[in-house]
Amino acid sequence: MSEDNKDLMLNIDSLYVEYRTDDAIVKALNGMSLQIRHGETHGLVGETGAGKTTTGLAIMKLIPDPPGVVVSGDIQLNYLDVQKATEKQMEHVRGSVVSMIFQDPMTSLNPVMVVEDQIAEVFEQHEKVNHAEAIKRTHEMLELVGIPAERGKEYPHQFSGGMKQRVVIAMALAGSPGLIIADEPTTALDVTIQAQVLKMMKDLKDRLGTAMLMITHDLGIVAEICDKVSVVYAGRVIEHGTLEDIFDRTRHPYTEGLFNSLPNLRDRKAMLKPIKGLMPDPANLPGGCPFHPRCNYVMDICSTERAPRVYRTEEHYVACHLYNADNIQQGGMIQRD
């Protein structure tokens, strides 16, 4: 069920990443597979600790080593084998092929440099232009993200949270990358500013034809901006499909639980149905399907065998024992309210 590789901006295949310390081995990614086409917006959804940020860092080849170790798996980024790429190659790739927007913009900006110099560095590094030309392009980029060019001479502390995030987005877009990784980019923003930033990111992505990996735990953001969605649990995609597949034809019990945990705006008296228990300790994952201790549909096989992918369509698959041949024949499909 592989997609046409020539159309892929990113192809992650069976990626395993561990963080090894003296106390434990933390299994952050456990067979992560992900594909993003050129120009597509792909949502990576899951609870804290599911492995979303580690996936983004692995694409950028920024897993801290030590303690992080890429045990096995492949990452193909626009035909580049990331695992075999040298640091010099990655220095060129970061910014020009792929950029990452982190959730706290203040940690991404140098507090003692004016913002226009920070953005100009991207142009100077990747397009080899002189400083004057880089500043000119920086002013154009600031205007593009809704910041007056004259504010480029200000320092990060002089900007609000939403404006700082716009600066970071301008910096990410400056090298015209084919893929932007947005790691919870609106977490630190209030709801009104969050909506503005999301709209701006969507408009810029469409205008520039950039692919995007939107890492988030917020299903509202996914509904607003994403074309495809991968639901992650314990370092592995357990359900993947189009936006309509995931929202309207939910299959995995965990995905079902995520939707049932949302408030029902049509029925204010309706009680929330939270997923019982907590995310498993990645240093001590349960056997079989890692979700089985929290699952309302658990069967004996769930605690002993890892569930294979079962495809509903060419695009929509689920990794769950409920969908093996016997259960499908018995009509064992999950329906959510």
Image: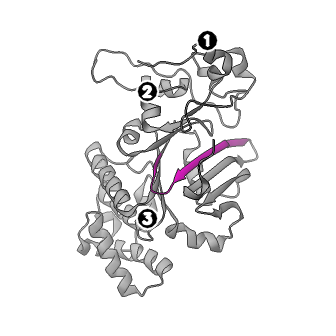
> Where does residue 217 sit, x and y in percent of width and height?
46, 39
Residue 41 located within the stretch drawn in magenta:
yes
Q: Amino acid at mark 1?
A: Gln
Residue 28, above or below 169: above
> Where does residue 318 sit, x and y in percent of width and height?
59, 31
> Where does residue 152 sit, x and y in percent of width and height?
30, 73
Mark nearer the N terminus (3 vs 1): 3
Residue beneath disc 1: 330
Residue 150, above or below 5: below
Q: Which residues are magenta?
A: 25-42
The span from disc 3 to disc 1 (Cα, nearest Å) is 50 Å
Main SS of the magenta part reads strand
Residue beneath disc 3: 172
The span from disc 3 to disc 2 (Cα, nearest Å) is 32 Å
Residue beneath disc 2: 259
Question: Along the horizontal axis of the image, is 271 left or right of 79?
Answer: left
Residue 205 picture quarter = bottom left
Q: Amino acid at mark 3?
A: Ala
Q: Residue at x 68, y 70 (%)?
A: 86
Decide: few, some or many residues near mark 1? Use Cα within 10 Å; few <14, some 14-19, many ≥20.
Answer: few
Residue 300, above or below 220: above
| Secondary structure at numbered mark 3 | helix
Front one among 65 and 137: 137
